[in-house]
Amino acid sequence: MSTKMVEGKTIISARINGQTSDFIAEPRDSLLDVLRENLQLTGAKEGCNNGNCGACNVIMDGRLVNSCCVLAVEANNTEITTIEGVGSPDDLHPIQESFLENAALQCGICTPGFIVSTKALLEENPNPTEHEIRYWLAGNLCRCTGYDKIVRAVQDAATRMQEGSK
Amino acid sequence: MAVDEIVTKSGDFKVIGKRPIRHDGADKVTGRATYGSDISLQGMLYGRVLRSPHAHADIKSIDTTDAEAYPGVHAVITSKDYPNVESKLVEGGEAGSQDLSYMSANKMARGKVLYHGHPVAAVAAETRDAAEEATRLIKVEYEVLEPILSARRGREKSSPLLHDTLYTDTEGEKDTEPSNVAEHRIYGTGDIEKGFAEADVIVENEYDTATVHQGYIEPHNATALWREDGSLDIWCSSQGHFWMRNETAKILQHPVSKIKVTPMEIGGGFGGKTLTYLETPAALLSKKSGRPVKMWMDRTEVLQSTGPTPGSWIKVKVGATNDGKITAAQVEISIEAGGFPGGPLHPCCLTSLAPYNLENAQVDGYDVVVNKPKSAAYRAPGATMSEFAVETTMDELAEKIGMDSLEFHMLNASKEGDWRVDGPRFLRVGNIECIEAIKSSDHWTTPLQAATEPNKVRGRGMASGFWGNATLTSSARGRVNEDGSVTLVEGSCDIGGSRTSIAMQMAETLGISEQDIVPIVGDTDDAGYTAVTGGSRTTAVTGLAAYNAANEIMAKMSTGLAEVWEVKSDDVTSQNGRFSCNGHDLSFKEAAALLHDNDIQVTGQSTVTPKTPAGAFSCQAADIELDLETGKVEILRYTIAQDAGTAIYPPYVEGQMQGGVAQGIGWALNEEYWYDDEGHLRNSSLLDYRMPTALDLPMIDTIIVEVPNPDHPYGVRGVGEVCIVPPPAAIANAIHNAVGVRMHELPMSPPKVTAALATAGKLQT
């Protein structure tokens, strides 16, 4: 489906966290810009704006992406999961529970990105080794934890999800 | 085998030492927590800063006409919009007093730019893109000057002056000729000449360490609304909103009573968010435009113009007898303050020799201005550099004597009652306990296996470190609710679980669950005055305020119950969260409800400024594998032992220890500011300024040593900082253990390691 243009801006339609969202984007807007500024989905964070830190990660059509490196116009007709779609405070995803119980966050700014990346990892590889976890999460920077408790939380989440799916 | 253990001398507690889920946890794992740049206000404009493309230049003229005319632009400011402030010393962040005129000129350049990225002007517009475009239309004429890019160069008499009116202050005496050396401090004890004469072995080295950044993932941000009546609201991520308010008030010459700063969630600080950056431009743009203005930095701006921690040049000379007793130590430290005076000179000097009990010692420190961003605090500011120099020298000395480095540490270790080089005696400290914890650790007692590839070698090293910890002022207020919960309003910005560690101390004192405490970080109009979350002080000092507030609550509840029960208040006993008297026996919740029903409302509050900080030691062990072809160092195993006093909230104590070690490893192996000869920062992205990723690190084993702080009701010392101090030295010592080469420069990145290997004839090709 082609996109519609209005005064140089594009009307974008995407399914975000299971709901259809229509919004207008400038050609230069990144997906992160529109998530945060147009749609008030501020769970994705801007840490570097050039794909180095992973704090803005979202899942787009099943693929983990840095939303700062995706143009908003590329989101047309896609299915996007942001941190807001992973779970809510009343209904936490097992990954979110295991991050909390393993103290896998300190300041919390990188946490949404790590949780989204972990979700993508465990969907692709439900039982990763420590090395596979570290390799997958090497695109997410955390400056507070030294990653130890994050890696343990991911291992714990994998166990929980496998037990939950039995 | 990963180890997380606690070696405790603390008491038995009901809440303290447990591992509850943090109060703000659910918001932070679901993306709902509101950080500084998540805020949105009606009619909000976006602000951007124009920054200097030069490291050192005079500003000849600034023309903002075209920017002002750009569509969507509502305001443009330069230093002309800042009030002229006098040159006087004011309270200025963790580095101590700062000159107010320098503080102002760092926010917006006044006549001269002193580093690549120095703010020159700022624009507010309807979109961020419009503001960015408009900054490019501002015409600035510069006369470029020669930059100074190292403390070595800055100390040369021939170096061009950054400030015409800066005179070296030597222990209170000002020089008459201007200089790039802002300060020369001298510390000492005993007689070093005599001490060196008594030495059988003397080792003398020089070290250089690179400028590094705190590297918090959240860029600086501020949103300001200046109303017509002069009241100013600021929302920002900082380590201390009262300090943000005070600094803003001084620079803008605006009453503190007119400024309210609301602390947003903060995405990391490590000392770098103890100073204002965007607060004053956002405020002035709001004043000029009449609209709220939101600003946040991009990563390049963060690296170019905030933080960093200074690069340094350090000379160390230590002598010892053949049986391993240190007879004298001398250290000379020169640090890069950045474009304005005030690097962390004092802590850099005082920590340098702290692990040792010395009869004869001298430390000279020089604070040198250079054309780099004005340095900010970074986790144990200054200590990592000086300990890298001292601890690698000590390792070499032990080697020359033929003594195990750990035994050498133990033999010379500082303890309670020993003099510190900066004057005071050590109080009760856990230096020896930390060394012993490493000595008996699974890590140290398990032999290191040899490398399996021919081009690789392995080594093990250890090092100690000290950080004094800070006290400063903290406040807490608790209000008992009718359902028995207690709302805790405190003033410490929560960077990593301090809401919970403070709530746990209040809960312990009240005899209730920490889940019945509702901790809130209050704004500057609400919370009692509280200094920054920094100096490892928050859990200790704000925790003390919460303890006092809880005791006041218990006393007032007993008095209130006595009134209801018609007995003497002295007869009401309170224990383990229950109140009883003459057959009455109520839980805390029942008591709260009864008091409410009788119109008795209970609040307890406290503001404290403890006089004596409890210093903290850490001893650490590193196993590394070194690639003799590429110079790459891999961390195989790492163990940290650290004296926490009492670990209130152990998972987050471990987290601080692991995080500090990870930063120390980055500092040791990768991180550095790369300036070209003109002083342009060439690696201002997180791709090129490379911090450790999950793939670069192993699990980091922790041993929490608990030697309680005698001046704290629960024995807390603070844990945030000393963990970062030993890693570079421990890793350098491990490299030597692996290949027999001493490293004298940070970072020990592949180019520097291969150069050192080549010099020693050990590089494989």
Image (spheres, rainbow, N blue to C red):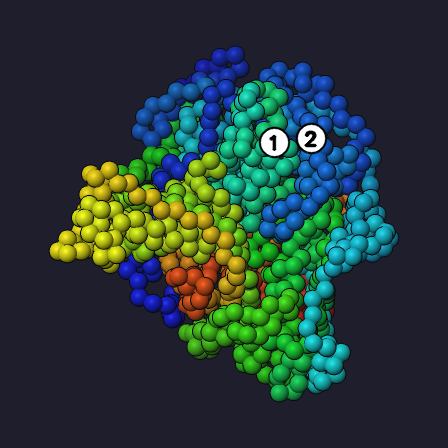
- Residue B122 falls left or right of residue B731: right
Q: Is residue B80 left or right of residue B627?
A: right
Q: Quadrant of residue B134?
A: top right
Which chain is home to disc 1? B
Residue at the location (75% across, 23% down)?
B63
Disc 1: which residue = B254
- Is residue B407 or residue B721 the one in the foreground? B721
Mark 1 or 2: in front is 1
**Image spot of residue B761 (x, y percent):** 70, 72
Q: From what the image shows, is residue B591 above or below residue B741? A: above
Which x, y percent locates residue B80? 72, 27
Question: Separation of disc 1 and disc 2 at Cα?
Answer: 10 Å
**Residue type at numbered disc 1:** His
Kindly tell me whether residue B335 is visible in this rendering. Answer: yes
Q: Residues within 10 Å of mark 1 (few under 14, many from 20)?
A: some
Query: Is label 2 in a helix, a strand or a loop?
Result: loop
Q: Which residue is mark 2?
A: B83
Mark 1 residue element = loop
Q: Position of residue B182 (x, y in %)?
A: 75, 52
Q: Residues within 10 Å of mark 2 (few under 14, many from 20)?
A: few
Question: Residue B583, relative to residue B388: is it above or below?
Answer: above
Location of the N terminus of chain A by quadrant is top left
- The answer to which of B498 and B49 lies nearer the viewer is B498
State whether residue B759 is above or below residue B178. Answer: below
Q: Say what amino acid the circle numbered 2 marks.
A: Pro
The reply to whether residue B456 is visible in this rendering is: no
The residue lying at 42 percent from left, 42 percent from top is B521
Q: Residue B126: which quarter of the image?
A: top right
